[in-house]
Amino acid sequence: MNRIFNAALLLTLLCATAFARQQPTARMIDEFGGVAFSDMLARLDSFAVELQNDPGATGVIAVYPEMSDRLPGWFMRRAHWAKGYLAKPRGLGEGRVSVVNGGFRDAVTYELWLVPAGAEQPVKPLDWALALSRERNPLLFDRLIFENRPRVPEVEEYEDYSDPKDRHESFVSALRADPAALGFIIAYAVRRDARGYDRRRSAREKLSLMKLHAIGADRIKAVGGGLRKNRTVEYWIVPPGAEPPKPAPDSRPAPRRRAKRR
């Protein structure tokens, strides 16, 4: 009886080992930090070739942001730009490549993964609910600055290929992870703008998020911040119990005095 049992156990272990060897696994194609766009394009081109050579596989762009002046949302937007580049100019199509936030690191890191059909996802998404539970202050998630100078036509390969919905997907995902967290949008105007531009701009940004992501109006508050040197929009996440951020406008320049006519 023991011989039969041992033989059956051995056969089971051998079958399990053989199955494990046949099980496809994800493979990391590339890893890099905050490189220039030209370098990133070259890496994405090589990644696209790997995906084209394996039509049944999908791609994953894993991002590990760093907490810095550029803010976590900036790194996520860059990853979604890469996703759009692979989907459109490189011809992989929508749904072939996904983006995942793998959690914070001391230095920003991007990973490009090839995931064969049937393989497990290689990167576990960041648990935003847990991350926000440790925060006691509002988190400046992202900032868009529109400089006051004539727009220079961009080189075609640097155009924004990301889907409009993807640009703030990570911001909305963080809010959804913790129903008690609040989103805060602060917009700033410049001196030549009409009065109230900052309030109207923040309201438009809120409405856009509500339409694109089907998030409730009660989850996001939009306010005008006053004047700054450049038009700016900031996206904040306010953890439960934290005080909301206060607008920080630049001091208003003194108006020019007209010379009196004699």
Image (cartoon, grey):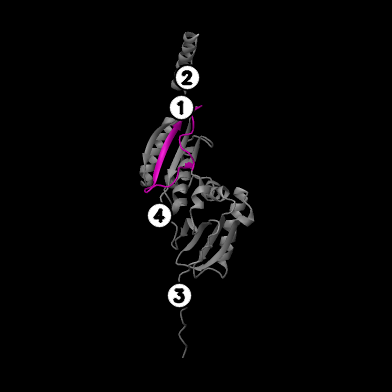
Q: Is residue 186 visible?
A: yes
Q: Label 4 amino acid?
A: Ser
Residue 173: numbered disc: none
The tag earlier along the polypeptide, 2 or 3, is 2
Label 4 secondary element: loop
Left of 177 or right of it: where is 69?
Answer: left
Residue 120: percent from left, percent from top = 49, 31
Query: Circle 2 sits on which residue?
Result: 16
Query: Circle 4 sits on which residue?
Result: 68
Q: Badge 2: few (under 14), some or many (20 or more) residues near its Cα, within 10 Å? A: few
Q: Which residues are magenta?
A: 100-125
Q: Main secondary structure of the magenta part?
A: loop
Q: Nearer the viewer, residue 108 or 78?
A: 108
Mark 4 to mark 1 CA distance (whole Å): 37 Å
Residue 67: percent from left, percent from top = 41, 53
Q: Are marks 3 and 4 in contact (CB under 8 Å)?
A: no
224 in relation to 23, above or below: below
Label 3 secondary element: loop
- Most extreme residue toward the bottom is 262
Label 2 secondary element: helix
Residue 215: percent from left, percent from top = 62, 51
Left of 254 or right of it: where is 169?
Answer: right
The tag earlier along the polypeptide, 4 or 1, is 1
Query: Circle 1 sits on which residue?
Result: 54
The tag earlier along the polypeptide, 1 or 2, is 2
Residue 253: numbered disc: 3
Mark 3 to mark 4 CA distance (whole Å): 29 Å
**Residue sitting at 42 percent across and 54 percent down?**
70
Q: Are marks 4 and 2 in contact (CB under 8 Å)?
A: no
The tag earlier along the polypeptide, 3 or 4, is 4
Residue 192: percent from left, percent from top = 50, 70
